[in-house]
Amino acid sequence: MSSLSSSFSTSNLNASNPSTLASGDHRPSRAQRAVASIAATLALAGLACGVLAQAPSTSITIYSSAQPGAISPEMYRPVGGFSQGRVNTPGYAMVREIRPIKLDGARATVRFTDVAALIDPTTVSFMSLTDPETRVLDQSFQFDLVSNQALLEKFIDREITVVVPVGDNISEITGTLLSAAGGTLVLQNAAGLQTINSYVRLKFPSLPEGFVTRPTLVWDLEAPSAGDQTARVAYQTEGITWWADYNLTLMEGEGNKGTLDVGAWVSILNQSGGSYKDAQLKLVAGDVNRAPRPQQFGGMYPAAAMEMRSMADAGGFQEKSFFEYHLYTLGRAATIPDNSTKQIELFDTARAVPCEKILVYDGAGDTWMSEGEVIQDSSFGTQTKKDVDVYIKFANTKAAGLGIPLPAGRIRVNKLDADGGPGGGSLEFIGEDIIKHTPKDETVLIRMGKSFDVVGERRQVDFDVDTARKTVTETIEVKVRNRKETAIDVVVQERMYRGLGWTITRSSQEPVKLDSRRVHFPVSLKPGEEKIVTYTVRYTW
């Protein structure tokens, strides 16, 4: 290949027969040498404009706008070599870099490369730590990256050469490019229209103006004098987020008591189009308000690689209050490549955290509750279900072994089956739930699922409306049956759904008022036992 100014070529990344690219020769192809030549030439051009090749000092603070547990594995799972794409990744980050720059004169152009592809250029801030009087007169963001498709689009109605396979050999077709849609090239030359579905290489006469190999900020700087300076640059980028996952192991004790081992991991999904090497990492937990963003559209992007990091080494996350949020700072440098998911332990596993299993029978379910007039329809709220819900509750306190702010996330619970698996047991998944941001000294309640051996039944046994006295009187009967071989405690939850003004006039046992619309009836059952709870409630208006 001749010099860059005369011609260059690229390999077809989507060629139907990629084996023809090398033909058994593992030396760099002409295409590979061409791309390397382009990169080298542009790199030299960048140095000439003032960029130094020294590694930058970087810090990144990541914010998540995802609903807890809402990150689907399909967002970063390889599908046919590609992920589902960087479409509205629910998060963003503030990136700060300190780099040396060199100004060739009091007025100089500086190319700041390797910024995130999804940078918001309006958020860029520049400060010279060497000379604060240095300022940016104007800025442009160049993101037209070199690729086969981008080059083809630039060369529509221009002449290119396509290298195509012919049996075990290759041939060249030169002509004016008319179309490059859907992987099919249409060329026109003296032989007429040529349709090409498979090719080995493309040859272009020159590199179109404006193409870069990496997203680049270009500044027109003004300074008191030329020379070396150190600049601090900050910007905001989309396409990156984080979330918390909690892994709990349950050890049941007597009755409804037990203990939990509580571990937590932070997952960082980076699809911002930038990599952050040896960066100081910070995570913000809390609901940070942002102005509405325009609709973003994305396509197919390379699959994200998975990387697991252990907390066996020093330098874990340190937490502190920050404004009305919580800030988690990693005590060691972290590298976050583009198109990757990194997992880092949030805190050391808390052992033997006391917990309690709670069985709740809510026979009427999430019935709509009237906020106005008392509902006089006798059939309203008489539906019933048999399922008894199972919860696990534990206190996020220092005395229990925790006592730290817990970011919102998915919480999974496993239990050891001592009779199965190698080594004398195996962990079996028994349920998961979502927790919101939970401050220290608060209670965590995990909805696990439904009990197999405990059932309930609810029915209306009496109903009366007295319009003269403006009252509705209703009597409810609830049955709970224990089909286990062990004794249990069940909370019967009843909702006062007909209106706000209510009074329980008679009940088989004393109710516990939970709030303005709900009461609890604690019930203890022996193995095989059934118990009945009845109560009468009067609504007034």
Image: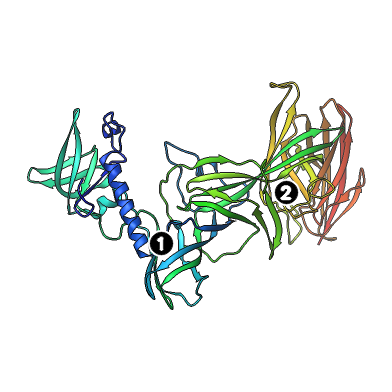
Residue named by callout 1: 51
89 on left or right of 329: left
Of residues 268 and 499, which is closer to you in this image? 268
In the picture, residue 72 is in which quadrant? top right
Q: What amino acid type should be assigned to the residue bearing mark 1?
A: Val
55 on left or right of 489: left
Of residues 18 and 188, which is closer to you in this image? 18
Circle nearer the N terminus (2, 1): 1
Residue at 89 percent of width and 30 percent of height? 526
Q: Which of marks 2 and 1 is in front?
A: 1
Q: What crowding class fits label 2: few (fewer than 14 Cα within 10 Å), some (14-19), or many (20 or more)? A: few
x, y percent for residue 103 = 40, 69
Q: What amino acid type should be assigned to the residue bearing mark 2?
A: Phe
Residue 382 appears in view: no
Residue named by callout 2: 380
Residue at 44 percent of width and 65 percent of height? 101
x, y percent for residue 326 = 68, 58
**Mark 2 near mark 1, Cβ–Cβ under 8 Å?**
no
State the SS at label 1. loop
x, y percent for residue 33 = 29, 44
Of residues 524 and 123, which is closer to you in this image? 123
Farthest residue, direction front? 227
289 on left or right of 383: left
Farthest residue, direction left? 190
In the picture, residue 139 is in which quadrant? bottom left
Q: What crowding class fits label 1: few (fewer than 14 Cα within 10 Å), some (14-19), or many (20 or more)? A: many
